[in-house]
Image (cartoon, grey):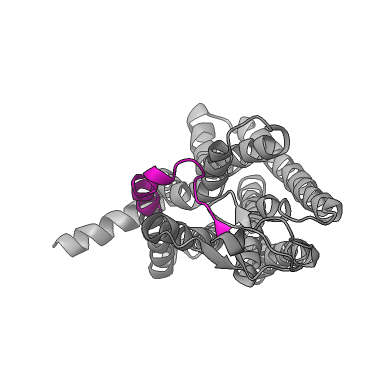
Amino acid sequence: MSDSNATDSTNPSTFILLGFPGWEAAHFWISIPFCAMYITALLGNITILYIVKTEPSLHEPMYYFLCMLAVTDLVLCTSILPKTLSIFWFNSREIDFAACLTQMYFIHCFSNMESGIFVAMALDRYVAICHPLRHSTILTNAVVAKIGLAVTVRSTLLILPLPVLARLLSYCRTTIILHSYCQNMAVVSLACSDIRLSNYYALFVIFFMTALDVVLLTFSYTQVLRAIFRLPTKDTRLKTFGTCSSHLCAILVYSIPALFSFLTYRFGSNVPQYVHTLLSNIYVLAPPILNPIIYGVRTRQIQDRLFRLFTHKGT
């Protein structure tokens, strides 16, 4: 273990993930909710994919985007939790340098991809409510596929420089990562070379993608709310707004933990390390766990299909 704590090589062969620093004695107990969260995320997102695939009435843009979100969530939680659970259960803390950078890439790429999918879903709600008669002609299957491809390419290309820049750094101090997974800031902070370029690029990605997505979301929902308030009756307004409520809840589940995690990393120098680790895990794991629950609870078509599925099995 002592040999892996420090190294003179430019790129170390392995890093050491500590999990929750200071809480090592409680790792087994911490693993219980983490394991439950992983199972919940897997079952929830796989169920969403199965329901949409087997129910022809759900073969619409809104549910295609929901499937994209479910796949993104599955990749996101699987990029983190198997290794985290191996730390908790087997004290398997070593991670290969290349594997660490790969994990970093998948986490940040698919997390940002999730933001792009929310924008696509907001576009769908905008067209459905503001231009209902043209919805099927505007958002065709080909257009939905192109939007999904654009979201994927955007995240893939913008996030790729992060692990590349991290690989170019010199790591000559310690290889101990005070975290449960290879988060970008946790890794590059171990370098003994100049990390300003890496930090500047990470900030650029955060602010560029966040600003762009916030502008698009704000525009979409401003137009949606204006259209809703022009509807003639209160019941119609509430029913129409209800079609957007699950999407708005999912955006809050994604954005609030992300905001707290970002603020504590950038400005919370006096915040204990385990709080940083906990917030970073919540930021990444909350959407995969809660999104299927939100859409399952607030989307009547999914509720009906799920009810028929269990009723059929029961009989």
Residue most extreme to the left: 315
Q: Provide the major secondary structure of the magenta segment.
A: helix
Residue most extreme to the front: 2
Magenta highlight on residue 22: yes
Among the 4 quarters of the image, the one containing residue 181: bottom right
Viewer-closest of 205 and 210: 205
**Residue 8 x %, y %:** 74, 65
Magenta highlight on residue 302: no
Reply above or below: 255 against 83.
above
Residue at image location 49% in from the left, 38% down from the top: 242
Reply above or below: 252 against 114.
above
Reply above or below: 124 against 257.
below
**Residue 109 x %, y %:** 66, 61
Query: Number of marks in the image?
Result: 0
Among the 4 quarters of the image, the one containing residue 57: bottom left
**Residue 175 x %, y %:** 64, 58
Viewer-closest of 269 and 150: 269
Q: Is residue 50 left or right of residue 224?
A: left
**Residue 154 x %, y %:** 74, 63
In the picture, the quarter occupied by the C terminus is bottom left
Query: From this viewpoint, is residue 186 visible?
Result: yes
Viewer-closest of 120 and 82: 82
Q: Is residue 88 left or right of residue 7?
A: left
Viewer-closest of 98 and 221: 98
Q: Which residues are magenta?
A: 16-37
Q: Is residue 31 left or right of residue 122?
A: left
Query: From this viewpoint, is residue 140 visible?
Result: no
Residue at image location 70% in from the left, 50% down from the top: 185
Residue at image location 38% in from the left, 43% down from the top: 26
